[in-house]
Image: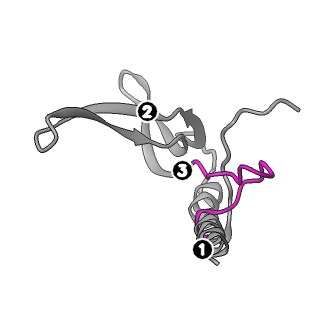
């Protein structure tokens, strides 16, 4: 299996939004609701910091975006609009194992590792 380097973890805390989107998919003669899933790569934006007199970078993590799209007929043809959307940010991985954990697990693990180093 090929590794992408990006990890997204679904948990009970973030799956509810996706369940809502799935529950609302339907098809009728007049309209249609479907999910558009997109991968948004991480981005870096350069911003001037007047305190340091230097450019600094702000990094956005990679993100999975799920949009519930509604299509409907208008006088000029079919139109599309976003009905609902959710996004899930990239999850950090454990450097040693390559395993990805939910953000709160990673934070707890990181704190535990720091405690071990200080002991």
First in residue order: circle 3 vs circle 1: 3
The residue indicated by pointer 2 is 43
First in residue order: circle 2 vs circle 3: 2
Q: Residues within 10 Å of mark 3 (few under 14, many from 20)?
A: some
Magenta: main secondary structure: loop
Q: Which mark is residue 89?
A: 3
Specify the segment rendered in magenta.
88-104
Q: Nearer the viewer, mark 3 or mark 1?
A: 1
> Horizontally, is 33 left or right of 44 in the view?
right
Q: CA distance from mark 2 to mark 3?
A: 12 Å
Query: Helix, strand or loop at disc 3?
Result: strand
Q: Residues within 10 Å of mark 2 (few under 14, many from 20)?
A: few
Name the residue at 61% across, 57% down. Answer: 18
Q: Residue 90 colored magenta?
A: yes
Q: Residue 102 colored magenta?
A: yes
* Residue closest to the far top: 76
The residue indicated by pointer 1 is 118
Q: Position of residue 57 (x, y in %)?
A: 33, 36
């Amino acid at each position: 299996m090929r590794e992408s380097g990006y990890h997204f973890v679904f948990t009970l805390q973030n799956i509810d939004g996706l369940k809502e989107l799935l529950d609302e998919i339907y098809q009728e003669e007049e309209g249609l609701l479907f999910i558009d899933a997109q991968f948004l790569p991480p981005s870096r934006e350069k911003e001037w910091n007047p305190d340091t007199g230097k450019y600094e970078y702000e990094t956005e993590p990679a993100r999975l975006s799920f949009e519930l799209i509604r299509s409907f007929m208008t006088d000029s043809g079919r139109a599309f609009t976003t009905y609902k959307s959710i996004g899930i940010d990239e999850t950090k991985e454990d450097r040693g194992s390559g395993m990805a954990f939910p953000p709160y697990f990673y934070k707890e693990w990181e704190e535990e590792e720091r405690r071990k180093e200080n002991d």
